[in-house]
Image: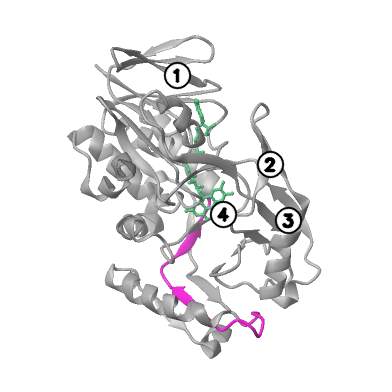
Amino acid sequence: MSKHIIVGGGVYGAAVAWHLASRGEAVELIEAGSIASGASGGPGRRGVRANGRDVREIPLMVRAREIWPSLHEVLGTEPLYETTGQIQLFEREIDLAPAEVRAALQNRLGIESRVLSQDEIREFEPGVAPMIRGGLYCPGDGVAFHARTTHAFAEKARLAGAVLREGVEAAGLVATDGKVTALETTEGERIPVTGRLMLFCNAGVKALVAPWVDLPLWSRTFLVAVSAPLADNPVRHLVGHMSRTLSLKREPDGRLMISGGRPGTWDHAARRGTPIRKEVELNVADAVAVYPELEGLLIETADTDHLEAECIDHVPVIDSLPGNEHVLYAAGWTGHGWAIAPAVAELMRDWVLEGAKPDLLAPFAFGRFC
Ligand SMILES: Cc1cc2nc3c(=O)[nH]c(=O)nc-3n(C[C@H](O)[C@H](O)[C@H](O)COP(=O)(O)OP(=O)(O)OC[C@H]3O[C@@H](n4cnc5c(N)ncnc54)[C@H](O)[C@@H]3O)c2cc1C
């Protein structure tokens, strides 16, 4: 029986491993560190947001939203997802017109959306500063526990018979006349590729496929700052901002998670990030500017330990390797690959089992850069 090899134990690798193993396929997954040690791990929760998303990803989000609310029942866990609604705040007059156009577009594509007026925004988020003029609101958006979900997928994959090997790093693809026949690890082990080879190793994909394609991706860290518990957390929804680098999540224990895309530094050898103090201060300053009662907020955790790959046009590249239809890869989620993961994982399963790339993945082909 042929065996599928998956590289990467983040949400994509773990979910696809489960999907395939539960259909009776033989699957081996290798992970350089431990399950959920990359972008799918770390503190807080991840936003499950359709609001403001690239239009190419909206159909994926429509499907993902059908999966998220009952995913924990399938995985046999406590609830992993909470519908909170997401609001993209704006404070500049020039952001009103794009918000209105985006609301109309999102509604047309099946994502209920509307623009909240200056008065309405205060009913939804009473703590916002006077300069906030409104918000683009998506009631169906939410947040999910990312590390728990990824571990749950991995556990289900194991139970279904997949072999998950942690601490095993892919060094390169072994090819004969351009055809990939094996995977070589940094320890010199050669793993034959008899079924599909799937590269879901995010920041590690670019190097592995470099002999075939030059992906327009780069890696970077994203700062996550988590406050001490607040007696009265003023943030009610999942909140973003149209002109500030800011995302706010209210955690179940009263903490506030502040993120949005500020960087940290990255040590490739140690595979660890270091937060940049100034960036933490700027992130907090933006939060306080938008919610003045956060003044004096105490940050307990600043984390940049989870590397993500960004793509030049802000959506992932999902494709097979030229001349190697049995080698699939997906990377370059650009800080918003979490929300769509359950939908994309299903499509990757269908691609493997049915042999044809699903239409919903067509916009993410490498060919768009050629
Ligand atoms: C701080 C932060 C906040 C985010 N917030 C959101 C959000 O709110 N909403 C949203 O939708 N998305 C968000 N994202 C993005 C989302 O988390 C990622 O896009 C998603 O988790 C990527 O999953 P993955 O499985 O592709 O990658 P990863 O989880 O990074 O998994 C890849 C794995 O591959 C392993 N690996 C790498 N190279 C090799 C190799 N050569 N051999 C073997 N293994 C290897 C790594 O160790 C890693 O565990 C955020 C990302 C970060 C970092």
SS label for mark 1: strand
Looking at the picture, which amino acid does disc 4 mark? Answer: Arg
Residue topped by disc 4: 45
366 in the magenta segment: no
Q: Earlier in the sequence, mark 4 or mark 3?
A: 4
Which residue is at the far right? 296
**Mark number displayed over residue 280:** 3
Asked whether 130 falls inside the magenta stretch, the response is: yes
Decide which of 166, 79 is in the foreground and name it: 166
Q: Tag 4: Cα neighbours inside 10 Å, few (<14), some, or many (≥20)?
A: many
Location of mark 1 (residue): 172
Indicate yes or no: mark 2 CB to ligand 1 under 8 Å: no
Q: Which residue is the extreme one toward the bottom?
A: 119
Q: CA distance from mark 1 to mark 3?
A: 36 Å
The number of numbered discs placed on residues in the rendered structure image is 4
Q: Amino acid at mark 1?
A: Gly
Label 1 close to label 3 by CB (< 8 Å)? no
Magenta stretch in the rendered image: 126-145
Mark 2 or mark 4, earlier in chain: 4
Distance of label 4 from label 3 (alpha carbons):
18 Å
Q: Which mark is residue 265?
A: 2
Give the Cα separation between the discs numbered 2 and 3. 12 Å
Q: Look at the magenta stretch and give its main secondary structure.
A: loop
The residue tagged with tag 4: helix, strand or loop? Answer: loop
Q: Is residue 42 left or right of residue 190?
A: right
Q: Observer-nearest residue: 369 or 231?
A: 369
Q: Residues within 10 Å of mark 2 (few under 14, many from 20)?
A: some
The alpha-carbon separation of the residues under discs 1 and 4 comes to 33 Å
Task: Indicate the secondary structure of the residue bearing disc 2.
Answer: strand
Under mark 2, the amino acid is Thr
Q: Which quadrant holds the N terminus?
A: top left
Label 3 residue SS: helix
